[in-house]
Amino acid sequence: MPKMQYPHLFSPLDLGFTTLKNRCIMGSMHTGLEEQAQGMHKLAAFYAERAAGGVGLIVTGGVAPNLAGCGFEGSAILNQASQLDGHRGVTEAVHQAGGKIALQILHTGRYAYHANSVAPSAINAPITPFTPHELSVSEIEATIADFANTARLAQQAGYDGVEIMGSEGYLINQFLVVRTNQRSDDWGGSLQNRQRLAIEIVRAVRAAVGEHFIVIFRISLLDLVQDGGTFAEAVQLAKALEAAGVTLLNTGIGWHEARIPTIATMVPRAAFSWVTRALKAHVGIPLIAVNRINTPDVAERILAAGDADLVSMARPLLADSQFMLKAEQGKSEQINTCIACNQACLDHVFEGKTASCLVNPRACRETELNIEPAAVTKRIAIVGAGPAGLSCALSAAQAGHQVTLFEARSELGGQFALAQLIPSKAEFRETLRYFSVMLALHQVEIRLNTRVSAADLAGCYDAVVLATGVTARALDLPGADHPSVVNYSDLIAGKVAAGLKVAIVGAGGIGVDVADLLLHQPYTHSGHELSQYLSDWGIDKQLNQAGGLLPVSPTQPARELWLLQRKKGKPGAGPGRTTGWIHRQSLQRNQVHLWGGVQYLRIDDAGLHLIHDGVEKCLPCDQIVVCAGQESVSTLYGELQALGQVVHLIGGAELAAELDAKRAIEQGMRLACAL
Ligand code: FAD
Ligand code: NAP
Ligand code: SF4
């Protein structure tokens, strides 16, 4: 029986008044649809698809209980019966699809990005410009009543429960610790006073909704900020919350202002399930493990080990709405795995755009981007098996076309196949596994080691799609042909050995990744990575320290690196709103020389000559790695057009500037839908 592959994951959970069909919760994610006209209709389709895909319980994105608690002006709020219609559409769609759904109640406190933010004390958050107003006692009491009101409304809207957001550094969490709570009344000072708000909210919510309604509390087990709570305090709170009527405890890790990565791709899988496990001995209610759980195997391992009773996955359900169904049917190889890149989900939300997913451009576009069966089956040639070509080939085949995919190299992936060799991007290999399995399933004919010309293709196909991608830009500098000069692709592919003193020319995403490669060991998914990650970022494995933080020991870097760019300013931010700071911190810790505003002069046996800070210098490096951007490979386009062939350009072949796999994959899918 395929189901037995994951017996713990697919074991139902009886909560007394209701039963969850399995141990997978879809974690809360703000999508940006919540605030749009017609957004609730789109949200209903988004959640219904995940419910049909078999997830045990969905938790919505955060909804504020009052205006002060909104994340930004106009963000989602539920405080009046007149707002119920959109929510009813969501709950009905989920229930019709056989799922269950809980509404997350989120009061952002001092994280609110508006002038009317409130907090236990008037202390600014480092990530917002607004000074919060200190809540008065009557305002605190009103806030508790607002939580209860929203929970009552959620019940009226048909939700199966609510999740009270008490972690990640939001309002309730702000009350819990002295970092943000410096009150001297009944709501601050002693631990009992600081925990009062959390407990009173749970009591009020439980009283409002009765016994037969799921109440999840998301508790912060590791704050990962200075003057944060201790684990012993979290244990005490967990016990009090259980007594106050919580059904399930979801375990949160890290405040938003923490400077420790907790969900990005360099964080090892299931990196925090040991923290959830540490709480298990202290409470009787089921616990939910979170963070970097992205495959059924990882989920099963956590549950089988007894670290938690349920697992929460958010981004993996964006990446593949059918995750649970595929796991249940023994088709895990067909899961489109979340690679934790944050590029289309969190980065979008922080940029005020609708969330989606790099590996699944349909996410949050369920009502508008669908692969419909083609009216006429066409013979399609796709040239290039990078992300653009792979995505186009799969979507075209899913639409029913007869697809042949030509690739000059011996493997699939193009530039993405290089990306997966960067230690912190080992997850990227999952995307190539997915495409490889799915192309075979949909009978795409793949011709590797085949560099095609216009003459090979013209007249043989109804349409040709050129996904021939990009090639590395060469340096235009005296001495650019010196033996010490290598391009990033040869270095990453291991065709040349790395030097000990290396200058990286170009500090875009690839320059930063090359630095990562030169500083870190290859990733192996072993226990070693977890210990290394915890010690690199100063996380207290003994759970004795406030905030879970230990001092970080200095690193002895593997080699001396210079990361260079001509633009002024410090290089190394890399692309990625939510991940750039992680790269910067890692580069600084490894003492990489970050030089902006340089002018390259020449290369010779002495090294790389340049002007930096107005002074001519020679870097005594034994290797110069060129990461100076890329150029499109698209010569076939004109040739095919001249031969009268219908031809389309996608991905890097169309435009090298601002290219990333997100654009390449989306463009591939969109073109396939239009063929
Ligand atoms: P390519 O990936 O260049 O693929 C084109 C393919 O066409 C190649 O396989 C090539 O061999 C083949 N081809 C060319 N001509 C012919 C021909 N005549 N016949 C047959 N085949 C041919 N992007 C992100 O979004 N996030 C990241 O974190 C990220 N990290 C990266 C890290 C590294 C180290 C690198 C190198 C890239 C990274 N990228 C990342 C960029 C991403 O990989 C590219 O944007 C993406 O691969 C471009 O896709 P594409 O399909 O347009 O082209
Ligand atoms: P890039 O981001 O455009 O960076 C190119 C770098 O080369 C810049 O630092 C540029 O800075 C420098 N440069 C450009 N022309 C040069 C020249 N003629 N001589 C010397 N230096 C030159 O490109 P990339 O790093 O090659 O990355 C390619 C694409 O992959 C990017 O669009 C990126 O989005 C994507 N990618 C994404 C990620 C991610 O984590 N999201 C990671 C890797 C790659 P100066 O001009 O200031 O010198
Ligand atoms: Fe995961 Fe990246 Fe998709 Fe976000 S964009 S869900 S991190 S694969």
Image: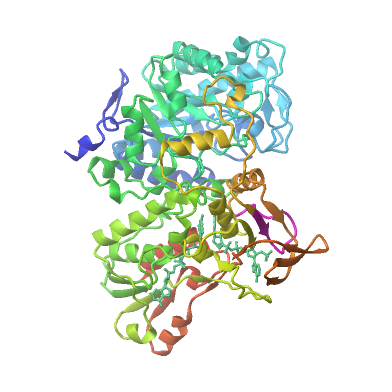
Q: Is residue 194 above or below residue 225?
A: above
Name the image quarter holding residue 508. bottom right
Q: Residue shown at 60%/69% (left/top)?
A: 485
Residue that protrudes farthest toward the right in the picture:
614
Q: Is residue 132 above or below residue 633?
A: above
Looking at the rendering, the stretch of residues picked out in magenta corresponds to: 561-574
Residue 522 x/y as whole percent? 46, 49
The answer, for residue 153, to whether it is visible in the render is: no
Residue that protrudes farthest toward the left in the picture:
1
Q: Is residue 225 magenta?
A: no
| Count of numbered labels shown in the rendering | 0
Left or right? Give the position of 207 relative to 117.
Answer: left
**Viewer-proximal residue among 377 and 253:** 253
Residue 590 x/y as whole percent? 63, 46
Here the colouring is rainbow
Q: Is residue 562 magenta?
A: yes
Q: Residue shown at 39%/43% (left/top)?
A: 317
**Viewer-proximal residue among 570 and 99:** 570
On-image quarter of the N terminus: top left
On-image quarter of the C terminus: bottom left
The answer, for residue 354, to whether it is visible in the render is: yes
Main SS, magenta residues: loop
Residue that protrudes farthest toward the front in the picture:
605
Residue 431 x/y as whole percent? 39, 54
Residue 348 x/y as whole percent? 55, 50
Name the image quarter holding residue 141. top right
